[in-house]
Image (cartoon, coloured by chain):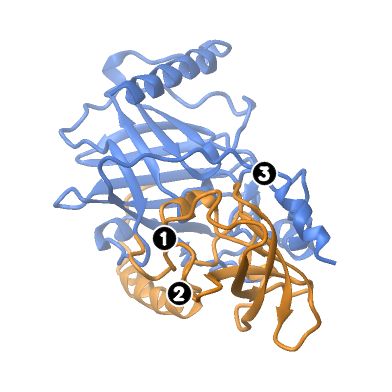
Chain colours: A blue, B orange
Amino acid sequence: MVRMREVLMTAAAAVFLSAAPAAAWAPAPAAAATPAPSVDLSGFWAPAMGSSPDPALVARLPPNTAILSDSGFIEFPQGEYGGLKPKPGALAAARAWKPEDEMTVSRTCAAPSIVYAMQGPFPFEIYQTPELIVFKYEYFDMVRLIFMDGRPHPPADAPHSKTGHSVGRWEGNELVIDTTHLSPATITNNGLDHSAQIHLVERYKLSSDGKALMATQWFEDPEALENNGARYMQWTAKPGQYVYPYDCDPSFAVNYGKGE
Amino acid sequence: MAAHRRSGNVKTWRMLAACAATMLVAGAAWAHHSFAAFFDPDRMVTVTGKVTRFAFTNPHGMIVLVGRAGKEPEQEWRAETNAPVVLLRRGWTRDIIKPGETVTIEGWPARDGKPYLRLRRALRADGSPIGVPFGQGDS
């Protein structure tokens, strides 16, 4: 309980700081918020590798969407983008990318954006209130605030970050999160990057027994991609566990250079 | 995102799942840097030697040892582990391996030929596994 209070207080402080400079996207009246359902997504969620996708969630994905098969431990080799169709500029950059460029002190602790980060083999915690939902990821200690109070996204030229700006709503028992303002970062961890124009939509729901959390992550990026992309992800409830600090150590990169 | 039915998606998912199963390198692949780009998933190297350093920080732990891979000359090898946050849940601790200890490491070698690998498993001198090997009780 104390930990939850700490997280929510931190989140509340972040809400204040992020809302302060831009009156245009201050919280909307409470009436604009969608009513919270009885479902509670709170808890510790560990990745469930190899889970069969939920057909109903997958069926909701829009057309012209490539569904990536790299969730969990799987990674694409260089030149494989899982059905995504990069635009010429993004493709040229991906082809010019060299994996050793990532093995530097300045790069090794540069977190990807949540586009790639959320599908990996790391757990996360959810803290839920009617107005605000917090996702606390183990990977790179990332924290996301999902505003449920009806506010809009900030202006297009507002600062971008690896976690972006997220607003959520309930559609029945499904949590739908809309995210913009993401800094350019990898999509497939092999040179293909999304732009600052990427728009992410996630849809979360619990399994009927409440022991599994299922989600689709869908994205469009008119600057980098000809088509759209999506991933299916699933996690298992692990009551009593919590995320560990990641506290990335960039000196790791030095080891690779020493292996001459 | 407008709700839209795509009946082909389920079939596509089954196909992708089958492909993914063939691509899966249990417990090894996902990293902050690309496993597929750095390491050869079709080769496996085994090195036995004496540990000179063990680091247990994210994004990857590091075992440095001086030893031999088969009949190759003795040299310094480095093996990066899965992220320690993952290994902590598999029984690893920051002092589970000590300098001076003889261990055997097995993993996927770097594509560029450096004496550097991605750890699949580590064994003590008596052959017992260090930590819980992947594939046993994976969540």
Tell which residue pokes out farthest to the right in this image.
A260
Quarter residue A5 falls in: top left
Q: Nearer the viewer, residue B50 or B57?
A: B50
Pointers 3 and 2 in contact (CB under 8 A)? no
State the SS at label 1. loop
Residues marked 1 and 2, same chain: no
Tell which residue pokes out farthest to the bottom in this image.
B71
Subunit ID for the residue under disc 1: A
Residue where numbered disc 1 is placed: A63
Residues marked 3 and 2, same chain: no
State the SS at label 2. helix
Residue where numbered disc 2 is placed: B20
Look at the picture and state if B53 lies above or below B26. above
Q: How far, Cα to Cα, is label 3 from label 2?
A: 27 Å
Residue B19 location in percent, x, y?
A: 45, 79
Q: Nearer the viewer, mark 1 or mark 2?
A: 2
Residue B102 location in percent, x, y?
A: 63, 69
Q: Earlier in the sequence, mark 1 or mark 3?
A: 1
Q: Nearer the viewer, residue A248 or A37?
A: A248
Disc 1 marks a residue whose amino acid type is Pro
Residue A103 location in percent, x, y?
A: 75, 55
Residue where numbered disc 3 is placed: A109
Q: How far, Cα to Cα, is label 1 from label 3?
A: 35 Å
Is any atom of residue A119 visible in this view?
A: no
Quarter residue B32 falls in: bottom right
Subunit ID for the residue under disc 2: B
Q: How far, Cα to Cα, is label 1 from label 2?
A: 22 Å
Q: Is residue A144 left or right of residue A194?
A: left
Disc 2 marks a residue whose amino acid type is Ala
Q: Crowdedness of circle 2 by 10 Å Cα count: few (<14), some, many (20+)? A: many
